[in-house]
Image: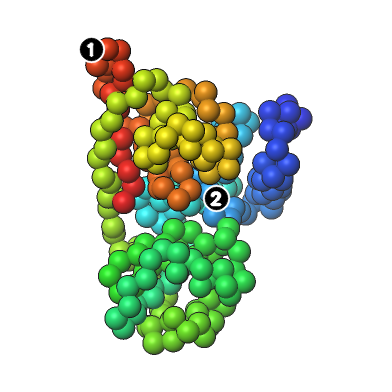
Amino acid sequence: MDKEKIFEKYKNEEERILISKLFDKIGYVEKQNKLQYTDFLSPLELQILKNVLNIINYKNYVIYGGIEESQRNIIILFPEKLRELFTNQSFDYNSICNCIRIVNKSENYDHKVYLGGLIKLGIKREKIGDIVVYDNGADVIINKDITKFALSNLQELTRFKKSEITIIDIKNIVKKKQEYKNIKFIVSSLRLDNIVSELSRTSRNKANEILKQERVFVNYRNETKNTKIIQSKDLITIRGCGKFIIDDICGNTKNGKIILNVKKFA
């Protein structure tokens, strides 16, 4: 593999470190003939590493997040001798990840409260996967190495003192389908500032300020260029406003404006 060519493609230092760690893990798998896996990756980090694996034509890996449509995933790299385990779907993912179930007596907390509690304990974000929130509780996917620490210390936090906290089989995570709100609007062009203006329900000038404040992400990459042209299926996140997917570019009005169908993540 030509590592130099790959690093030439990725100039950002954080991305280079991420890729270097992947190469280290691949080297370990090949030399020690043992399985390796990454921390939980953001969607952008996952996309970068998938691109690298495709470039080097590396096949012995799976992507796992514990639930369907997971936002944070790990990449598991395995030696050829373990291929059948993954092909037959008989690999025990509890050996890598655990699920901590938090059941509250009466309180309904949102995602930020659960994540904030874990971060307050000193647990790094990359050790935490998706958090599935439901009435009076949440299922938290977490790196196996820090499960005992989290289990021992979560109840020390005031908000969880009366909660029931247990480890469950990762197969038994609560299944919760992603919900969306459908939005339809008309724009004069597919420039990003036009789209941000509509999604944030503000003026073009204010939309440009939001872009300058680095609050806008397109397909998980921070974007400040207001002239960027948005495509169908692009994912747009605006900090303070929410996350959206351009579901369909429906066509044009009689005066040439563009009709969009957008889904807002609930």
Please name the residue shown 37% across and 47% down the image.
69
What kind of residue is marked 2?
A: Leu
Q: Is residue 138 visible?
A: yes
> 173 or 205, which lies in front?
205
From the top left corner, tell me how far across and down residue 112 is, in percent: 45, 64
Q: Which residue is mark 1?
A: 254
Label 1, label 2: how far apart the Cα atoms are? 45 Å
Q: Is residue 78 visible?
A: no
- Residue 2 tag number: none
**Quarter residue 39 falls in:** bottom right
Hey, which residue is sitting farthest right in the picture?
A: 4
> 63 or 125, which lies in front?
125
Q: Which residue is mark 2?
A: 41
Please name the residue shown 43% across and 72% down the image.
100
Give the colour scheme of this rendering.
rainbow
Query: How crowded is the residue under tag 2: few (<14 C-alpha within 10 Å), some, or many (20+)?
Result: many
